[in-house]
Image (cartoon, rainbow, N blue to C red):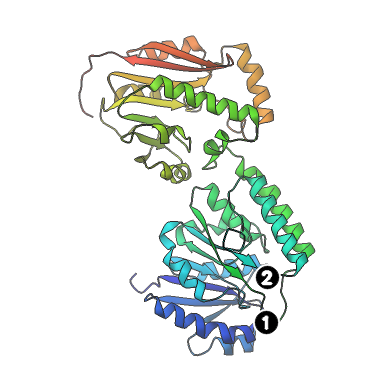
Amino acid sequence: MSSLPDLSVVIPAHNEAPNLRVLLPQLRSILGGLGISSEILVVVRDEDPETQAAAGGGLAAVLRQDEPGYGGALRAGFARARGGHVLTMDADLSHPPTFAADLWRERDTAEILIASRYVEGGSARMPVARALLSRVLNRFFAWGLGVRLRDLSSGFRLYHRGALAMEAVPARDFDVLPEIVIRAYTHGWRVREIPFRYEPRVHGSSNARIVPFGLAYLGTFRRLWATRNDVDAADYEDRAFDSRHPPQRYWQRTRHRHIRDLVGPAGRVLDVGCGSSRLLGTLPAGSVGLDLLIGKLRRARRFERPLVRADAVGLPFRNGVFDAVVASQLVELVPSGGHALTEMARVLGPGGRLVLATPDYGRRRWRLLGTLYSRIVPGAGDHPPVARYSRRQLVDEVASRGLTLEAERHILGAEMILSFRKAQRGSGREW
């Protein structure tokens, strides 16, 4: 394992020998100055003796891609790359090799670093038509897919190996660039942009063609829209808090306020099924977020709270260790909802509060508003409930586990947020 390089550099190159003769020696020198082990992989479409000659003398290995397009070149390079980090850059000298060192030095700040032309401090010299198309597509993708990134089409990037999952990326052309980033973002990986200055290529002409380029991007956008609005997306709850859909924004913020009020000044809180909800960030520092989906936990890292990956029906905690337990939009989705309630009651300390937020399926108002909500808000109806509690059913279920209803709130008479109190006396036994 010690022989594996720290960094793999993947360079798609089609008839780029004149540029590679300049780029590769410079890049080798810069990487050597970083004091790391590295490999450079040049990916070509066809046999190219000139490229082979430019990469000679141990400067780089030349690979031939099996699949067509820019995406096919990246796939070939990623499949062969052995480094813990992977740098991608163009062969045409528009990506200055000196900036590779800047990206490497920032590698611990995010799992994907983008050399960005469009954040403050960055710039680009391009033909007017290409510059306009690039800015329009980047703005369209960022706004339409709800990501706070400016340059999704930059190919100058540094990836942590774990954030690359090309088997989930069907794009084959330059549209592979936004797809990689957005899918990583949707799985909770951190993405950061670093400003850089883009200069036009030195030799030859660009291999991108504007019309096919734009059409491919639009097709990819349609595919990614469904991914971004799936409730399993890592940042779904976080985005919902600031949703551009007023019903979703109202519902999320009202629920957040009610839960926070009912939890009160509890010391240590367990948020079961925390997702990326901002509620976790408002709980006391000793509180714990728990979820089964690793992507949501990656996203929740920013709240700087302890995080645990586990199932609600088997909580990995001792008896009575929490002052409050919260479960929002969870009990209706858990096949063994009764087991989850038993577990939440078990880890709750004597006198502690259990706060549950779930639709009131016993009321006609929820059936009406829930149907309307799922049609208005993207992704809201993706996971149908497996348990449909009425207020009375849920109160009885929790009461059978030794807790008493203490307070309640409602959202438009359709969703119930119930607070239960555990008896002051408990066994205190540790599991």
Kindly report the distance in space between the C-alpha atoms of the residues bearing marks 1 and 2.
22 Å
Residue 125 — which label? 2
The three-letter amino acid code for the residue at tag 1 is Asn
Tag nearer the camera, 1 or 2? 2
**Which residue does the image show at 52% across and 15% down from the upper left?**
410
- Tally of numbered discs: 2
Most foreground residue, 379 or 336: 379
Most foreground residue, 410 or 66: 410
User: In the rendering, at what x and y percent does residue 5 appear?
Assistant: 40, 73
Q: Is residue 312 visible?
A: no
Most foreground residue, 340 or 94: 94
**Which residue does the image show at 48% across and 35% down from the upper left?**
277
Is residue 238 positioned above or below 31 on the image?
above
Quadrant for the N terminus, please: bottom left
**Which residue is identified by label 1?**
15
The three-letter amino acid code for the residue at tag 2 is Arg
Q: Is residue 187 visible?
A: yes
